[in-house]
Image (cartoon, rainbow, N blue to C red):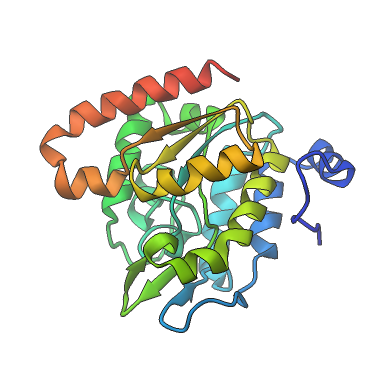
Amino acid sequence: MPQWRLLPNSKHSLKLASVMTFAEQVLHFNRSLSPDWEIPAHAQLLYPFDAPDTWAVMQAFYQKYYSDKQPRIALFGINPGRFGAGVTGVPFTDPIRMQDVCGIPNDMDKKPELSSDFVYRFIAGWGSTADFYRYFYITSLCPLGFVKDGKNYNFYDDKKLERAVKPHIISNIRAQLSMGVSNKVALVMGVGKNWKFFEPLNREEGFFEEVLPLPHPRWVMQYRRKRMDEFLAQYQDALAYAAGKL
C-alpha cells in the first residue's frame, strides 16, 4: 500500500505518479484512509469507504473520468456530507447525479443533495461531464466528513475539531498534489470559514501559487437561489481562468 503522507516532491511520490493513472492514485489514497481519527466525542466520523456499494460506484466513476496521467485543477470543498461523498465516495456527487449525469448505475437511495445540484449545473455549463473532468478534480480540504446529532458537521465548526483534523488536511492536500493536481491555482468553494481557514494555511505551507474563493454551492442553493445564474457565471469565469493555467 502506498504511503500517501509524503511531501509532493518525494521521490517515491513522483515514481508512483509516473506509473499510476490519476484514477489509480485517487483510489489508493481513499483506500489508505482509516476511520480511527481521534476527534472530539461530540462529533462522529463519516467514513463511507468500507461499504462495498460505495467502493464499486466510486471506482467506476474515477476509472471512467480519470484513467490518464493528465494534471487537473482542484476545486476544494469543506468535507464530505451525508448525501454526497458520504454515500458515493465522490465529492458533491449524490446517487442521482452519479447515475443520471455521470452514467454510473447504482442501487443507492436516490436522495438529492443541494450542493450536488449546483455543482452539476456549472459542470453542464462547461460542456460535457467528460470535458469538465478532463480539466478539473473536485475534492475537499478534509478527506473525511463529520456528523453531529445526525446532521452534517464541518471541521471548522469548533476549534477542537479543527485542531484535531488539521494534520489530516495538510496530508490530504499534499496527496492531491502528488497525484497530479496543479500547484498553479486552486479554487476553494466557500468564501467564509472555508476560505478563512485555507488561505493562511496555503501561505504557510506554499501549496498553491494562487487560490481563488467561490461561494459554496449549498449557500447558493439555500440562501441565494434567485441569483443562481449570477453565481454559475462566476464559476464559469473562474474555471476558464484556472484551466488557462494548465
x, y percent for residue 224: 15, 41
Which quarter shows the C terminus? Answer: top right
Q: 17 or 173: nearer the eye?
A: 173
Please report the residue visible at 64 percent of the width from the left and 71 percent of the height from the top.
34
Q: Residue furthest top?
A: 244
- In the drawing, does residue 48 fall left or right of residue 83? right
Establish if 177 lies above or below 127. below
- In the drawing, does residue 188 fall left or right of residue 117? right
Q: Quadrant of residue 155?
A: bottom left
Q: Residue furthest bottom?
A: 41
Q: Quadrant of residue 185?
A: top right
Q: Is residue 81 at least partly visible in the picture?
A: no
Please report the residue visible at 46 percent of the width from the left and 51 percent of the height from the top.
91
Q: Is residue 79 at least partly visible in the picture?
A: yes
- In the drawing, does residue 141 fall left or right of residue 184? left
x, y percent for residue 196: 42, 45
x, y percent for residue 221: 20, 46
Please report the residue visible at 37 percent of the width from the left and 50 percent of the height from the top.
193
x, y percent for residue 150: 31, 77
Establish if 184 lies above or below 162. above
Please report the residue visible at 60 percent of the width from the left and 33 percent of the height from the top.
208
